[in-house]
Amino acid sequence: MSDKLPDILPLNPYFREMVWGGRRLAELFGKELPDGAAIGESFELSAYSGRESGVSAGPLRGVGLGALVERYGAELLGSAVVERYGKCMPLLIKLLDARQDLSIQVHPDDAYARAHDLRDNGKMEAWLVLHSDGGRVAYGLADGVDESAFAAAVTAGRVEDVIRFFPVQRGDLVFSPPGTVHALCAGVVIYEVQQSSDLTFRIYDYDRPGLDGKPRELHLQQALDVIDFSAQLPSPDRKSTRLNSSHLVI
């Protein structure tokens, strides 16, 4: 490996097949997707173990981002980042293509992850909508829904009745702090900036089998532990910014 860190590190993404994924990342952004795979996530900037982006050109071609972080530390990340997080890339950037609705889910915060000795950090995330076929997002709980009402709705199979849905269009911004019940829904493609974590507690998944043909695991009790039932969330429109050109480069 070269001792000199180049000024620019072009990266190849890691593509992740998901049961709800599609093929629009090729159509919209020219991604060379694996043949026949329903790609839900493209890890554009990732040092997450097993899902790393890697250098695509230059003297460090083929080297994964995690190895670069370990080798170059503060030279790559900055001294303030290393002081706070160690030699660890704290952020992960993805493109997501929702051909189907994602599961209704929630993420824990760092404190919960540490207290329960989970292998990842908590997960805070923000979405910029790049494309929407008249799609929507699930975002937060309906007014007056407390823990008992939410648990009863889940048990009765009517969780969609107690959460809020908002239509979204290109340029909308959605911020989801830990504890927010949410889901990306069919027809929406987003640019996501998140903590480098894969901690997701699924609440409802439409009785849908996973890629292995088996039902995907749900985590209702963990979800109830971390949902912020007191949160006052704005609608995505109030945080909206419109993309008025095609200047975004992926």
Image: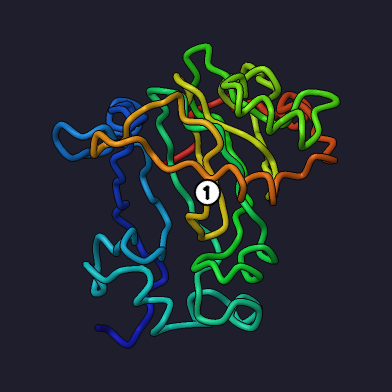
Does residue 99 sit above or below 105 in this rendering? above
Decide if residue 188 is in sight here.
Answer: yes
Q: Residue reaching furthest bottom? A: 3
User: Relative to the observer, which residue lies in front, 58 or 66?
Assistant: 66
Q: Secondary structure at mark 1?
A: loop
Q: Residue at x 55, y 32 (%)?
A: 104
| Horizontal arrangement in the rendering, residue 1 relative to residue 94 (left or right) | left
Which quadrant is home to the C terminus? top left
In which image quadrant can residue 228 be found? top right
Q: Position of residue 10 (x, y in %)?
A: 34, 59
Q: Residue reaching furthest left? A: 35
| Horizontal arrangement in the rendering, residue 8 relative to residue 246 (left or right) | left
Decide if residue 125 is in sight here.
Answer: no
In which image quadrant can residue 26 be found? top left
The amino acid pointed to by label 1 is Thr
**In the rendered image, which residue does mark 1 sit on?**
200
Q: Position of residue 239 (x, y in %)?
A: 75, 32
Q: Residue at x 81, y 33 (%)?
A: 146
Q: Position of residue 191 (x, y in %)?
A: 50, 39
Q: Residue at x 48, y 41 (%)?
A: 218
| Horizontal arrangement in the rendering, residue 217 relative to residue 197 (left or right) | left
